[in-house]
Image (spheres, rainbow, N blue to C red):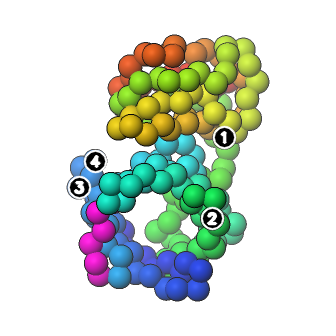
Amino acid sequence: MKCEIELDGKLRSVEVIHSGERARWTVDGSELDADAVEVSPGIYSILIGGKSFEARVEAKGDSQLRVTVAGREYEATIRNPRKWKRVRAAGAEAEGRQQVTTPMPGKIVLVLVKSGEVVEVGQGIVVVEAMKMQNEIRSPKSGTVERLLVIEGQTVNAGEVVAIVE
């Protein structure tokens, strides 16, 4: 995917080439050593040059985004919005019974809710530690935690269901 992003008034050319589970990033023609995983809707765990960041991305309109990294907010405009459908949809709440899964293998270090508890969209369900980083797995919808399928200290695989929200 190739697009232009205006970030705080500066126009950047960004290209992402996916090959299997890995992606290669190029910004303004220079290759960037970065990995990004969407840990829950609109929340990304990013590793750039060995440093870890959490980014929150909120849609503000068709191609407008608010990106928050390390407590600092950035305004971004996607110049090729038809290829950025996924981010626009990230602000939408999931419907129906949802299985909450882990995006990566790791260890459950904290369970934040109980079975039967009412949760809001984006509320933390569990915290998974992977590669010395802790990632909060959030609810994709408002509803009731029907079942918790993990306990603290349990090891999980990528894609494993940790909870069901009805």
The 10 Å Cα crowd at callout 4, few under 14, some 14 to 19, many 20 or more, is: few
- SS at badge 4: loop
Tell me residue 58's x, y (percent): 64, 59
**Amino acid on which disc 4 is placed:** Glu
- SS at badge 2: strand
Tell me residue 147's x, y (percent): 60, 14
Report the magenta residues as a range.
29-34
Which residue is label 2 attached to?
72
Which residue is label 4 attached to?
21
Q: CA distance from mark 1 to mark 4?
A: 25 Å
Closest to the observer, 134 or 118: 134
Mark 2 and mark 3 lie on one chain; the one further toward the N terminus is 3
Quadrant of the rendering where the C terminus is positioned? top right
Q: Main secondary structure of the magenta part?
A: strand
Q: In the picture provided, is 161 more to the left or to the right than 20?
A: right
Mark 2 and mark 4 lie on one chain; the one further toward the N terminus is 4
The 10 Å Cα crowd at callout 1, few under 14, some 14 to 19, many 20 or more, is: some
* The stretch drawn in magenta includes residue 32: yes
Closest to the observer, 29 or 108: 108
Q: CA distance from mark 2 to mark 4?
A: 29 Å
Which residue is label 3 attached to?
19
Which residue is label 1 attached to?
122
Closest to the observer, 156 or 77: 156
